[in-house]
Image (spheres, helix red, strand yellow):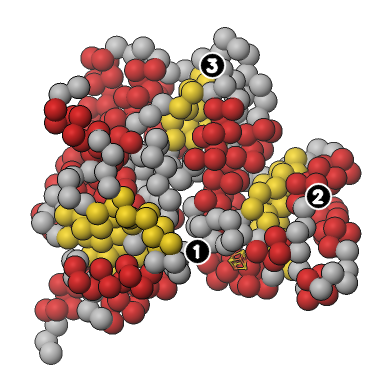
């Protein structure tokens, strides 16, 4: 390794903070997961607060029969006056009788179910026996155990033991992480053009299509917040392909390249296949680079997408990240990203929100990426903000979404300039 690479690969100093945090809990993941797995149902075992969170965050997206609900734990359950297990069995039986199309049911734990120590893994096992034909699994989305995107990680990790065993000699690629169908299809077309024939996704679109996994499986993480899922797959003998995450032209090329190398795809063929998409992405980025280059950006910790996005914005659009906060930093999965991030960027893990807000105010960044709860107060103080939740809900991966991803960051700056130019 040359000196520059060795210096880049050296561990970066990371500011670790513990204190009050302003992040959604893992229940939020249900909002995109229920749209991805079309015959799954998410039954949150929680309080009215949990129900309100889901309804207000997802209410606008429900068009037909909803595929999530909350089994409310009432005060008498919390006081131990009722048998919560009996109550849960009754709710599940009623739900499955009314909705026979449900093939996969997740019992999702919450803060209240944890407080009363309701054992949802035992409940899932018990209910599986009485409900043949429905896969019943459980995971926790509670605010005590998870932040925001960790709900998806917990959900996918719960799916891994249910995946069938792949024949030992079967060489296959697994894309791990919930992607919009349109983006997943784009990647599948590229893998097919490269000559990688067997490609599966976790989560699948239908419960019956759970991927076979085994020692012949190599997997690419499409999302940077899937540490537990990756570990569960490795425990099944699968091999992780380290790579940049597929954001922007560079990230997408590196991500596809990791798979191409693992499948022994000829380098010239690889370049020929990715060239058109890569060129389209670069063209789409040029327009936004004019507005974004030289602008400073501060990421509050939220979705765990922060490090790859900061790398994309710095390297492909010329932005200057000041601080990149993330709720949790998976050192191994983020290794390539950390090397690619420019020198001098403060990386912080965890949150002590007041201290971090002091740093935002002192830095006065051109753009602050943060959760909904922080955005309005910061805007009132004159700072321009971007809601981080949009980055999770929008299609942002891959060559053909690179321009849209850049635009998500450019839009608040355009709005700021328009407001500034209004007559006083
Ligand atoms: Fe609130 Fe906990 Fe329910 Fe999340 S799981 S909505 S943090 S009570």
Classify mark 2: helix, strand or loop.
Answer: helix
Which percent across, then down, holds residue 310? 26, 50
Within-10-Å neighbours for mark 2: few <14, some 14–19, many 20+: some
Mark 3 and mark 1 in contact? Answer it, CB < 8 Å: no
Residue that badge 1 annotates: 24
- Based on the displayed image, in which of its 4 quarters is residue 269 positioned? top left
Within-10-Å neighbours for mark 1: few <14, some 14–19, many 20+: many
Within-10-Å neighbours for mark 3: few <14, some 14–19, many 20+: some
- Residue positioned 41% across, 26% down in the render: 241
Q: CA distance from mark 3 to mark 1?
A: 37 Å
Residue that badge 2 annotates: 123
Task: Decide which of 399, 336 is in the foreground and name it.
Answer: 336
Mark 2 and mark 3 in contact? Answer it, CB < 8 Å: no
Mark 1 and mark 2 in contact? Answer it, CB < 8 Å: no
Which percent across, then down, holds residue 207? 66, 38
Placement of the C terminus among the 4 image quadrants: bottom left
Q: Is residue 271 visible?
A: yes
Sooner in the amino-acid sequence: mark 3 or mark 1: 1
Is the shortest distance between ligand 1 and the CB of mark 1 under 8 Å?
Answer: yes
Q: Is residue 309 visible?
A: no
- Residue positioned 26% across, 43% down in the render: 12
Residue that badge 3 annotates: 216
Which percent across, then down, holds residue 163? 65, 30
Placement of the N terminus among the 4 image quadrants: top left
Residue 387, above or below 35 = below
């Amino acid at each position: 390794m040359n000196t520059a690479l060795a210096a880049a690969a050296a561990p970066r100093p990371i500011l670790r903070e513990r204190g009050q945090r302003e992040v959604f809990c893992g229940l939020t993941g249900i909002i995109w997961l229920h749209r991805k797995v079309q015959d799954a149902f998410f039954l949150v075992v929680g309080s009215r607060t949990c129900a309100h969170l889901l309804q207000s965050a997802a209410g606008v997206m429900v068009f037909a029969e909803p595929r999530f609900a909350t089994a409310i734990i009432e005060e008498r359950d919390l006081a131990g006056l009722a048998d919560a297990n009996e109550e849960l069995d009754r709710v599940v039986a009623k739900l499955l009788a009314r909705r026979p199309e449900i093939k996969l049911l997740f019992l999702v734990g919450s803060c209240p179910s944890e407080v009363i120590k309701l054992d949802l893994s035992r409940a899932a096992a018990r209910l599986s026996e009485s409900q043949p034909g429905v896969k019943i699994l459980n995971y926790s989305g509670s605010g005590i155990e998870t932040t925001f995107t960790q709900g998806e990680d917990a959900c996918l990790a719960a799916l891994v033991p249910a995946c069938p065993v792949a024949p030992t000699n079967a060489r296959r690629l697994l894309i791990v992480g919930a992607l919009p169908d349109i983006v997943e299809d784009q990647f599948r077309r590229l893998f097919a053009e490269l000559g990688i024939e067997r490609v599966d996704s976790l989560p699948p679109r239908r419960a019956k299509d759970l991927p076979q996994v085994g020692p012949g499986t190599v997997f690419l993480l499409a999302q940077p917040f899937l540490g537990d899922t990756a570990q569960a797959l490795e425990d099944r003998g699968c091999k992780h392909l380290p790579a940049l995450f597929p954001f922007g032209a560079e990230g997408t090329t590196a991500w596809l390249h990791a798979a191409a190398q693992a499948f022994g795809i000829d380098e010239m063929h690889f370049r020929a296949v990715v060239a058109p998409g890569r060129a389209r992405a670069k063209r789409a980025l040029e327009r936004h680079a004019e507005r974004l280059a030289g602008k400073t950006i501060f990421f509050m910790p939220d979705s765990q997408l922060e490090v790859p996005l900061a790398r994309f914005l710095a390297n492909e659009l010329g932005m200057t990240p000041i601080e990149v906060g993330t709720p949790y930093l998976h050192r191994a999965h983020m290794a390539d990203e950390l090397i690619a991030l420019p020198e001098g960027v403060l990386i912080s893990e965890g949150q002590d929100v007041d201290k971090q807000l002091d740093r935002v105010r002192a830095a006065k960044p051109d753009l602050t990426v943060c959760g909904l709860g922080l955005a309005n107060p910061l805007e009132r103080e004159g700072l321009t903000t971007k809601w981080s939740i949009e980055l999770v809900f929008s299609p942002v991966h891959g060559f053909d979404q690179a321009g849209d991803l850049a635009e998500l960051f450019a839009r608040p700056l355009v709005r700021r300039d328009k407001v500034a130019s209004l007559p006083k």
